[in-house]
Image (cartoon, helix red, strand yellow):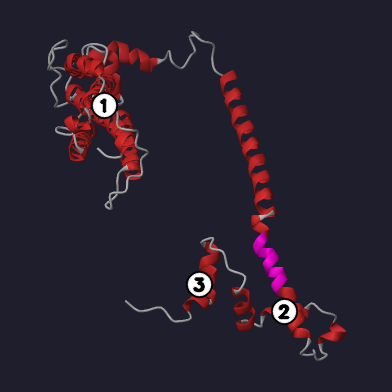
Amino acid sequence: MSKPREDYEKTWWRRLERFVNGERIENHEYDDIFEQNPSFLKEDIQKEDPVRRHKKKKKTDWPERLETLKELYNRYEKWPETKGITIFKRIYGCIAVLFCLALITVLLVTVSNLPTFGSAHNPASNEVVQRYIEEGLAETGAVNIVAGMILDYRAFDTLGESHVLFIAASCVMILLRADKKGKNHAVKSPQVKPDPILKAAATLLTPFILIFGIYIVLNGHLSPGGGFSGGAIIGAGLILAANAFGFEQTGRFFTRKTYSVISLFALLFYSAAKSYSFYTGANHIESIIPKGTPGAILSSGLILPLNICVGMVVACTMYGFYSLFKKGEL
């Protein structure tokens, strides 16, 4: 790698770079600027009276003129820290208020133009809803119409929501996880001894909470529930166990590697499994995925495995958020 020049810090390019990066130029550096760049005075000379322009300047005038220009540069440097910030805050406040008023106006106009609730012309009462109700069971195989809509008709929308959860957890992990030097960026809460009552209650309730969450995930295509609600219940059970028994106990089966593997596998499987609809799952094209017998646990095509994937992502995200904010790592 080539070494920078010895006078690199004094070059005009380095000063421009420092200005763009917001680095402050010290006052003593102005001397170097004027000594090395006397051409700054040319523009000042050209603005003078044309009659006096061609007259020779006395050498004694230059120090005085140089000091004047230095003072102007000093004022220019201090302006952002005094009046500049005040003016910027006022302009920023005015623009923010105008933007909020414009947004409120647009929202109010939009709401005022909506059809009356319950009207026959309401967009909610159109052929799409009728199609979900009349053809949903035959096309998706799911007894739960909501599950068929979310994980079949609008499965890619649900995939985007799952990715949002994963990205949010990844961002929190980047910001709060302890770095390689062991420095923790999270605000740790004081270590408190587990309460015996909480520990006894968690010993009794945690297994039932986890089993109930799994039941909600596995029966999401048959009854109210699904991946989001079941995953939230499983995540709550893990948080209860961490509060009662400590992160050392939950860390035996749930670590950062576990979170990464489960989330990555679930999202990749979801993407790969649902991609079949590009080729065989569109309307009026026979799907190669068997729908099974409606009402059976192994039915509704891919809705069951997709529910499992969504439930795993939601559970991992909930526990991951809690763990990161509580101790700064998974």
Q: Quadrant of residue 26 in the image?
A: bottom right
Please name whichever residue, 243 or 107, is drawn nearer the observer in this view of the structure.
243
Callout 2 environment at 10 Å: few (<14), some (14 to 19), or many (20+)?
some
Which kind of residue does numbered mark 2 sit on?
Leu
| Residue 283 visible somewhere in the drawing | no
The quarter of the image holding the C terminus is top left
> How many numbered marks appear?
3
Question: Is the residue under label 3 in contact with that under label 1 (CB below 8 Å)?
Answer: no
Label 2 to label 3: alpha-carbon separation: 23 Å
Which kind of residue does numbered mark 1 sit on?
Lys
Q: Position of residue 267 (x, y in %)?
A: 23, 35
- List the residue tagged with mark 3: 14
**Mark 3 falls on what kind of element?**
helix
84 horizontally vs 157: left or right: right
Label 1 to label 3: alpha-carbon separation: 56 Å
Q: Quadrant of residue 153 in the image?
A: top left
Q: Quadrant of residue 298 in the image?
A: top left
> Residue 193 bears which disc, if any?
1
- List the residue tagged with mark 2: 66
**Magenta highlight range:** 70-78
Q: Position of residue 120 (x, y in %)?
A: 48, 9
> In the image, is residue 223 above or below residue 322?
above
Which kind of residue does numbered mark 3 sit on?
Arg
What residue appears at the point 47 percent right and 78 percent down from the top-left corner?
8
**Mark 1 falls on what kind of element?**
loop
Callout 1 environment at 10 Å: few (<14), some (14 to 19), or many (20+)?
few
Q: Main secondary structure of the magenta part?
A: helix
Callout 3 environment at 10 Å: few (<14), some (14 to 19), or many (20+)?
few
